Amino acid sequence: MTVRIFLPRDSSALALGAEKVRKAIVSEAQRLGVPVEIVRTGSRGMFWLEPLVEVDTPAGRAGYGPVRETDVPGLFASGFHLGSTRHPLSLGLVDQLPYMKRQERLTFARNGVVDPLSLSDYLRHDGYRGLRAALAMPPAAIVETVTHSGLRGRGGAAFPTGVKWKTVLDTNADRKYVVCNADEGDSGTFADRLVMEGDPFSLIEGMTIAAMAVSATKGYLYVRSEYPHAMATLEAAIQTARHAGYLGDDILGSGKQFDLEVRKGAGAYICGEETALLESLEGNRGIVRARPPLPAVHGLFNQPTIVNNVLSFTSVPVILHRGADFYRDFGMGRSRGTIAIQLAGNIKHGGLIEKAFGVTLREVLYEYGGGTASGRPIKAVQVGGPLGAYLPESRWDTPLDYEAFSAIGAVLGHGGIVVHDDSANLGRLARYAMEFCAIESCGKCTPCRIGSTRGVEVIDKIIGSNGSNGSNGSMQQIQLLRDLCDTMVHGSLCAMGSMTPLPVLSALDHFPDDFRRDDSGRDMERRMP
Amino acid sequence: MDSRLPCTVADPVAKTVVRIAADKSAIPGGLVPALHAVQEALGWIPPEAVPAIAGAFNRSRAEVHGVVSFYHDFRTTPPAQHQLRICRAEACQSMGADGVLAEAERILGCRMHEQTADGSMSLEPVYCLGQCAVAPALTVDERLWVRVTPDRIAEILDQARQETL
């Protein structure tokens, strides 16, 4: 009987040698005369186990990982293809691994399970049930369902998705657009990439439902150029969907029209801000627009436009399929549903954890993450990307909930978490936050454009100044830094300028010792472009 | 539209640019795709491409120059044979990206935003490759490397150079 073996084709797994493993499996199977079928999947999101090889058994999928090509003969010798768990790399049933078992995977249910480019796999795993439900509903009812689900923008801003859609629905125009913000530029985030590489049809379905909800006919996926693999997977999936009648002039015989186009970003972080993204799509510099007018009213090419993050769209099919109540039953407070926690940086078990809102940061760091990769104590955790606060241990009992994070002066954002061990210097990281803002600012607002450069200089004076701590000079510079941050917060149009102070000031407030003289400061100055 | 194009140009570079500009100016918001296409074809965006593109898109040269210079991806000088891009973002920093960068600078004998004296390799920063759970990450041309340590840089660079031979 043919053995079904599952092997990821996700870019992380490929970088870790998945292709070599595939070749080794093929050649060893041939040598032994074992008929095998290798199904390429996305990643489950347990990166310390990649490449993760799974074998179909009557009990479920048995996992082995991390597998290197040199492990393959041994795996066959141990009888892994017959379901034996004797090999040291054997993990048991993948669904039963504590990391997986304790998750609530709604939007990532298929990731790592299905072949991302197989439409029939997608359909077998509840794919397109959401769209079929949506097609049977009037547009206003689709919007109402999304509103009732409590879904908030997963890109970080957490704006209620249904409210945005309703604005677009209620705005009269000949042409409306649906735009997916797949410019996942924040360090510590990779969930959008995982979906695009591992379950692209769910994104296509989510965008199609959005289009049906507001009668849009054209959609764009703005994907960052750093994600060539995701882009290729999406392009292929879009073609398949089009051929099968899920996109095009007559979606599933409904007479409704919608089609998608992938557009490649060009390495500008600011294009993750929705108005800069629209400018870029229009063929301009990615300069942030003042709001109002909202993109929902005057968006792409001045038409009403839904702009949502990848994960906001991929949350929609399950909401339409299982119902708004099903989705909103997950979560806490005003944070309904699930969040795709992305655990990254210096962490032993980094990866994707989809959980209902409400799990604490400490649980994530230790029960899932298992502490640092380096084995040293965790010193600081940055949640929500480069514009998120650095949190010391005293804040780790905060539940992952938008409001709970605001209450401690932090942001939950998209749920990206970057862990730093005790070798990290928060003064340097604060400097980096300002430096990054200087490099990536679109230049529209003076506090962001110039303030960030001044911020680097001031921090250099603080951490490079010869004054011992508490000296007058240093105290003055720290006051200057706080004033500067205040100006940036209140004088910038978008999050780039107004939130860069968040990592800077949280580092300063929670780790003041790191803002004393740093002997490697000279080296950092050299790196400034 | 066509009357604005320098249609008598003979050299292949100009021909390529004119063809791409005509093609992409037909799609809404086609300027960024056009610049990507020019760079893919030529390796960079030569200064003489700007007027041709501006003509096709009915935009001023200044506007096109503005777009080219705004985006980090677009090169206005010829590329090195290979591009090494090292992620400098927080997650990679937490796993030692600074050390990786320092070692690359040492081996290549050039700094960030520069290229080696023989033009074989350029060194650029990149801000996140989405490999934050397997950091630090870098790319050499299209190839992605993760969990990179300074002692692997020499081998990674050798491999890229050998692949061209």
Image (spheres, rainbow, N blue to C red):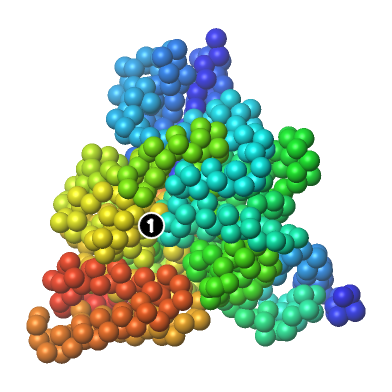
Residue drawn 44% across the image and 15% down it: A57
Instruction: Give the quarter of the figure containing the C terminus of chain A.
Output: bottom left
How far across and down, in percent of the image, does residue A82 sit?
A: 43, 12
- Foreground pick, B158 / B17: B17
Q: Position of residue A112 (x, y in %)?
A: 47, 34
Vertical arrangement, residue A390 with respect to residue A416, above or below: below
> Residue A141: which quarter of the image?
top right
Q: Nearer the viewer, residue B48 or A218?
A: A218
Residue A276, given in percent of the width and then of the height, sits at 55, 70
Q: Is residue A397 visible?
A: yes
- Residue found at the far top of this picture: A1
**Residue count near mark 1 (Cα–Cα under 10 Å), binned few <14, some 14–19, many ≥20:** many
Residue at the spot of label 1: A413
Q: Is residue A395 left or right of residue A120?
A: left
Tell me: A352 left or right of B44.
left
Secondary element at image label 1: loop
Q: Residue A177 is drawn in which quadrant?
A: bottom right
Residue A288, percent from left and from top: 53, 74
- Please count the marks in the image: 1
Q: Chain of mark 1?
A: A
In the rendered image, the quadrant that contains the N terminus of chain A is top right
Amino acid on which the number 1 mark rests in the picture = Gly
Res. A196 visible in picture: no
Q: Is residue A66 above or below residue B147?
A: above
Residue drawn 57% across the image and 54% down it: A165
Q: Is residue A120 left or right of residue B3?
A: left
Taking the spot 43% from the left edge, 78% from the top edge, the residue there is A492
Between A400 and B109, the one lying in front of the other is A400
Q: Tell me what residue is drawn at x 9 percent, y 86 percent.
A: A471
